[in-house]
Image: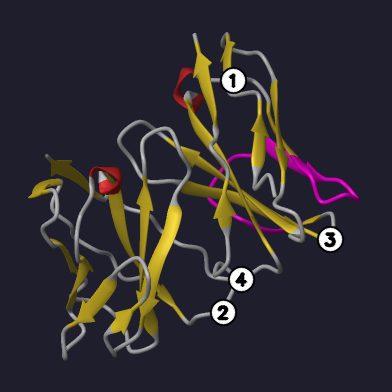
């Protein structure tokens, strides 16, 4: 079992650009949640996808959007990147929308210059 | 959601018990206490959670005070691999759709 996988591992973008991050959930999981983790801080919840729909959303602007595919994998898209978007982006998968049994991936480190 | 207060960092000798405190003085009656840890360059990992009774699993023990205003995570025999940031989080109900609100956690360093 590969667990939760994320790609790419690292990414460098410039201000104003757009970025797409990808997540493959753990085998058997159907729900994907995305988090942003700034350096030295805990993760902040962005949104959660279940049955290909956004089910919950944290306090993030519309520049942050996502998608879930029929195979349960997910993408996080961020438009018009700011310097402040530099962070570790974590994906977590689970069976159902509860938080127990949630497994995190290793994250994608995004640097915006 | 209730907030938590944790020390910024702690040291512990390898092989000794690591006791990580957490203050949650405004916790409500239906809020659970969750503990996660994050080893460097990895995503967070669930450790344990509890409501009012002490809990133990293969990773750790959770001691919650009788008034529930604080708790302690105990790693009974710390190893170097336990070096990580440990997060204490309170959250209502066990299976609701409320998401976790994460603080900055405690950086635990296990020393040889």
* Residue B108 relative to residue A3: left or right: left
- Residue A73 is covered by the magenta coloring: yes
- Residue B24 percent coordinates (x, y): 21, 71
- Residue B96 percent coordinates (x, y): 57, 78
The residue pinned by badge 4 equals A98
Report if the CB atoms under discs 4 and 3 are less than 8 Å apart. no
Tell me which corner region of the image, top left, top right, bottom left or bottom right, holds residue B60. bottom left
The residue pinned by badge 1 equals A81
Question: The numbered mark 3 sits on a residue in which chain?
Answer: A
Q: Which residues are magenta?
A: A54-74
Tell me which corner region of the image, top left, top right, bottom left or bottom right, holds residue A62. top right
Q: Which mark is residue A51?
A: 3
Q: Nearer the viewer, mark 1 or mark 4?
A: 4
Is tag 3's residue or tag 1's residue first in the polypeptide sequence? 3
Residue, x 29% and y 89% (percent of image)?
A: B52
Residue, x 88% and y 49% (percent of image)?
A: A71
The residue pinned by badge 2 equals B95
Report if the CB atoms under discs 2 and 3 are less than 8 Å apart. no
Q: State the separation of the CA atoms marked 2 and 3.
A: 18 Å
Respond whether the residues carrying marks 3 and 1 are from the same subunit.
yes
Is tag 1's residue or tag 4's residue first in the polypeptide sequence? 1
Is tag 4's residue or tag 3's residue first in the polypeptide sequence? 3
Dot 2: what SS? loop
Quadrant containing the N terminus of chain B is bottom left
Q: State the separation of the CA atoms marked 1 and 2.
A: 34 Å
Residue B39 in view of the camera: yes
């Amino acid at each position: 079992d590969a667990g939760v996988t994320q790609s790419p591992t690292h990414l460098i973008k410039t201000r104003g650009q757009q970025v797409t991050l990808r997540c493959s959930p753990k085998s058997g999981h159907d729900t994907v949640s995305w988090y942003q983790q700034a350096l030295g801080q805990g993760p902040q919840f962005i949104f959660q996808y279940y049955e290909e729909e956004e089910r919950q959303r944290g306090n993030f602007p519309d520049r942050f959007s996502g998608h879930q595919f029929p195979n349960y994998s997910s993408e996080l898209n961020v438009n018009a990147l700011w310097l402040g978007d530099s962070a570790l982006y974590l994906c977590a998968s689970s069976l159902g929308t509860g938080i127990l049994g949630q497994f995190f991936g290793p994250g994608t480190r995004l640097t915006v210059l | 959601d209730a907030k938590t207060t944790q020390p910024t960092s702690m040291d512990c000798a390898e092989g000794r018990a690591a006791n990580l405190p957490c203050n949650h003085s405004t916790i409500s009656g239906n809020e659970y206490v969750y503990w996660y840890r994050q080893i460097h360059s990895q995503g967070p990992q669930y450790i344990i959670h509890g409501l009012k009774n002490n809990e133990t699993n293969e990773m750790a023990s959770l001691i919650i005070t009788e008034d529930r205003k604080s708790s302690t995570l105990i790693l009974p025999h710390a190893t170097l691999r336990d070096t990580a940031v440990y997060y204490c989080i309170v959250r209502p109900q066990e299976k609701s759709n409320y998401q976790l609100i994460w603080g900055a956690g405690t950086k635990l360093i296990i020393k040889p």
